[in-house]
């Protein structure tokens, strides 16, 4: 990292705050809603908007990985695909939402696709925007930082008998063969 | 109140600021945009504050500033600010923020020397106070990220009016 111009202690030299700080959920909600509105003002359609949210999420994910690897994992970071997926499914999810994601599964149709699904979503009447694009961005950033570049998208899947759809985060890994190869060598 | 991990909040804010910088490519514009976003947050946040803080009506500006520092910041950001530097008329003061949750993990590169990273907060205060009939000006005058020794927001009361009967029903 670069040295700060202000004195000798740069940000990486400062002690890492161990405890869990909390802020009001509504403070985050205000911020997020401003973020969505801002993004909306810069784009002309929904998919661009989702891409923009994804972009912002990516920056968060990349940094979260570092924070989590230092704090929760004792300076270790996963290097195998399956371990990394578990990390996203449990550690990252618990960190973000206070609990594990519901399911982690591999796609039946393509072996390089994995899905994390969880309950809850915005009703269809709220338009076609999927705010989970932000979460998809966080997941993409986390995977990216760990060396598993993937295309990550968020989808709503209707659940029979349930009024609310479930949210599915679909991860399609790039260079899947190379990742598998790497896994074997470890 | 329900809470969320502060780091997610911090990182999301940081990522948003980076997005603004990338979009506007001009630090002054970014400052302005942050203030604008804060302003519209403040306008909505005041409702929640009034509903949940269970505080009494503020007697004067001095009272309002104390409430912002002690109750408002505690409620939403889980920190408190100190109110100092009153002028003689009691229309100007400074909020000193010892711990700024927006600025954790942040280090500004030299080319962003003019960036008021936490300018959102100024907007929030301005927006919130406007909804209770106090027009204020709020600016960051010292920022730890810019090498200052504290975070200081200067608060200046421009005008205030009390609601009088008959209330305008709009």
Image (cartoon, rainbow, N blue to C red):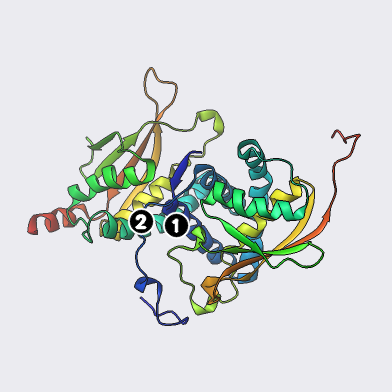
Residue nearest the viewer, comparing A142 with A111 = A142
**At 48% from the left edge and 60% from the top edge, which residue is drawn?**
B14
Q: Which residue is mark 2?
A: A64
Q: Residues within 10 Å of mark 1 (few under 14, many from 20)?
A: many
- Is residue A149 among the parts visible in the rendering? no
**Up-down: is A165 above or below A129?**
above
Please tell me whether mark 1 sits on a helix, a strand or a loop.
helix
- Please identify the quadrant where the N terminus of chain A is shown: bottom left
Residue nearest the viewer, comparing B79 with A77 = B79
Gap in angstroms between the C-alphas marked 2 and 1: 8 Å
Label 2 marks a residue whose chain is: A
Q: Which numbered marker is on residue B71? A: none
Residue nearest the viewer, comparing A103 with B77 = B77
Please tell me whether mark 2 sits on a helix, a strand or a loop.
helix
- Is residue A25 among the parts visible in the rendering? yes
Left or right of B90 in this view: B104: left
**At 33% from the left edge and 38% from the top edge, which residue is drawn?**
A99
Left or right of B162 in this view: A95: left
Q: Position of residue B119 (x, y in %)?
A: 61, 62
Q: Which residue is mark 1?
A: B11
User: Cβ–Cβ below 8 Å for labels 2 and 1?
Assistant: yes
Q: Position of residue B83 (x, y in %)?
A: 65, 61
């Amino acid at each position: 990292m670069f040295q700060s111009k202000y004195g000798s202690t740069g940000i990486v030299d400062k002690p890492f705050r161990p405890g869990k700080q909390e802020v009001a959920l509504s403070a985050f909600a205000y911020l997020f809603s401003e973020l969505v509105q801002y993004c909306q003002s810069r784009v002309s359609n929904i998919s661009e908007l989702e891409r923009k949210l994804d972009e912002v999420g990516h920056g968060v994910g990349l940094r979260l990985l570092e924070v989590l690897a230092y704090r929760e994992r004792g300076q270790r970071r996963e290097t195998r695909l399956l371990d990394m997926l578990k990390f996203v499914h449990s550690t990252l999810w618990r960190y973000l939402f206070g609990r594990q994601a519901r399911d982690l599964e591999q796609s039946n149709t393509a072996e390089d696709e994995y899905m994390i699904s969880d309950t809850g979503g915005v009703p269809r009447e709220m338009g076609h925007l999927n705010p989970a694009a932000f979460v998809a961005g966080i997941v993409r950033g986390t995977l990216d930082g760990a060396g598993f570049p993937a295309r990550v998208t968020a989808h709503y899947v209707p659940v029979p008998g349930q009024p609310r759809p479930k949210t599915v985060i679909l991860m399609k890994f790039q260079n899947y063969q190379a990742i598998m190869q790497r896994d074997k060598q470890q | 109140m329900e809470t969320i991990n502060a780091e997610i909040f911090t990182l999301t804010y940081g990522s948003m600021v980076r997005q603004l910088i990338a979009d506007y490519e001009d630090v002054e514009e970014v400052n302005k945009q942050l203030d604008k976003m804060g302003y519209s947050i403040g306008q909505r946040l005041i409702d929640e504050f009034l509903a949940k803080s269970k505080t009494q009506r503020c007697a004067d500006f001095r009272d309002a500033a104390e409430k912002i520092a002690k109750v408002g910041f505690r409620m939403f950001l889980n920190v408190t600010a100190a109110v100092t530097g009153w002028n003689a008329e009691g229309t100007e003061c400074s909020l000193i923020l010892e711990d700024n949750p927006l600025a954790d993990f942040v280090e500004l590169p030299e080319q962003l020397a003019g960036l008021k990273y936490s300018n959102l907060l100024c907007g929030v205060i301005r927006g919130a106070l406007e909804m209770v009939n106090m027009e204020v000006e709020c600016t960051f005058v010292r920022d730890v990220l810019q090498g200052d020794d504290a975070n200081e927001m200067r608060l200046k009361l421009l005008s205030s009016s009390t609601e009088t009967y008959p209330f305008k029903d709009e």
